[in-house]
Amino acid sequence: MVLLTDLPPEIVQHVLGYVDPPDLGRVPLVCKNLYHTVKGNSAIFRSVYLNILDRPADQFNVNWEQIVKDTAHLQAIGRRDRGQDKENELPFVYDTVKALLRNASVATDTERSRNAELLDGIFSEEANQSAFLCRSFIFERAGKDHNLLYDPTPRVDHQKSAQLHCLYGVPILQAKPGSPWTRANEMRLYACAKVYDLRQYTEKTKWGPFMDDDTDRVDWEKVEAIMIVIGSNLRKLRLTSFPECKDHWELSFAGVWPQSYVPSPFACQPESLELQDPYDITGNWLRVVCFLDYTDFFAYNFSTQNVINPSQPLPAIDFGEATRLILMKLHVTKIEPPGPDDGQELPVVYFEGVSRSLDDSRDENANSDLRGMRGSVRLTREGEVRWTTFSIFSGEERWRSESVQIGGVRSAKGVLGNWFDKDFDHRGPAGPTAFWKVPEGITNSQVQSALSYDFNNESEDEYEPLESPQSGDEDGEEEMVGWHFTTRVAQDD
């Protein structure tokens, strides 16, 4: 019988290239010969990496041995039985997940990333979700102490857990994953308390999902709350059963890395300006806007009973919300070098377009529901992708949004942020929004038919914008009529 160690070195190396990462760590313990074969052998670690993970775009700057060892350690952490044995590993898990996603790729539009599948297998375990994805402030408030005070300096572990949850991409809607559902355990109530709290909208935060320190650093706890609110409403409306929503809200680690969007083979060939756009803006985007009835929104923020300690969050919201679906068709209009406050790696790209409500039951003539859009995309100094959009009514900018793209440049996951009055009205209204790119030429089902509406048959100069709702009107209910979607999330759904 021929021993493995008796084989030629190149054959031994080839065989060990198919060993799983956790087992590769045990091979050097077998004997001195195998120890010296594995130790410092970058070729073996490269083979193991490429056999289980995606081929990275930049292979020259990959530390094969370190990532394989980190992957094995991540899998080992995930298999630990007790939650308290996992929680101290949050910094390592955060760094390793981000490293795996940075090097993720998709070979075709039908093949899923192997990096994403590996992470999906680890985080499908409820114990791992609790240990790493449910550690932000709102989860602590919902699961432990409803009277927690805001920390003036956001905690690092809160932020890291919230960002991991956003990268996971499937909103966790219970304070303790897998526990019996109760009203007090429903995360939407606590996420709404953050999203609809006007104290979160300040000049320093740019009225968006950024830190309250006059920087452009992303506040991942705000982004997480936005994701929970929108995801909960889409699920209650059963919109996540349609592929246009399901792939973005029900599939974990779906396209949350740079360059993960796969263009449709039916997309029009871009012109020269589009070829210079690093963000891939031109095309159709599906948008979701959620909001409270303005009377409820105003009372929630300004009633006497809610005048409390500035460090104390507002009570969990038990109001019904409204949701609106919008299809946007955008095209690039101008590209400029980054400004001094922008990330310097990529330019600032400006765009224009039209948007159309998909609530076709409100208006039989859908063409009359076209509105103008304009905005810009740029990098923050941290390298995150920041979107600014304006909705235009009768030639005037009316609503604005500030958002961040989950996963980086050209990620398929999409954009999460806040919408508000373009004049930063401190009386509101304001709320969460999300949008992601959808391919052209979609067919089958009423929703898909609406999404495949042919904007190319409409001249942008021919549409008739609706009158914009005015903030600050005496009749708050009439003020928001233009924003209502026919299906409302009921309090006792």
Image (cartoon, helix red, strand yellow):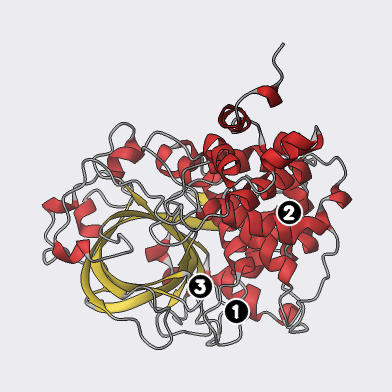
Seen in the picture, residue 241 relative to 137 is either above or below; the reply is: above
| Disc 1: which residue | 211
Q: Earlier in the sequence, mark 1 or mark 2?
A: 2
Residue 473 appears in the rendering: yes
Closer to us: 414 or 1? 1
Q: Looking at the image, is mark 2 or mark 3 nearer the viewer?
A: 2
Q: Position of residue 172 (x, y in %)?
A: 66, 49
* Amino acid at circle 2: Phe
- Is residue 356 rendered to the left or right of residue 400? left
Residue drawn at x 47%, y 37% is: 112
| Disc 2: which residue | 132
Q: Which numbered circle lies on residue 430?
A: 3
Secondary element type, mark 2: helix
Spatial separation of the CA atoms under disc 2 and disc 3: 30 Å
Spatial separation of the CA atoms under disc 1 and disc 2: 22 Å
Residue drawn at x 68%, y 50% is: 70
Q: Earlier in the sequence, mark 3 or mark 1?
A: 1
Quarter of the image for residue 328 reads bottom left
- Is residue 333 rendered to the left or right of residue 413? left
Q: Which numbered circle lies on residue 273?
A: none
Q: How many marks?
A: 3
User: Which quadrant is home to the N terminus?
Assistant: top right
* Amino acid at circle 1: Met
Crowding at mark 3 (Cα within 10 Å: few <14, some 14-19, many 20+): many
Q: Position of residue 229 (x, y in %)?
A: 58, 57
Secondary element type, mark 3: strand
Secondary element type, mark 1: loop
Seen in the picture, residue 203 relative to 107 is either above or below; the reply is: below
* Amino acid at circle 3: Ala
Quarter of the image for residue 336 reads bottom left
Quarter of the image for residue 301 reads bottom right
Q: Are marks 3 and 1 in contact (CB under 8 Å)?
A: no
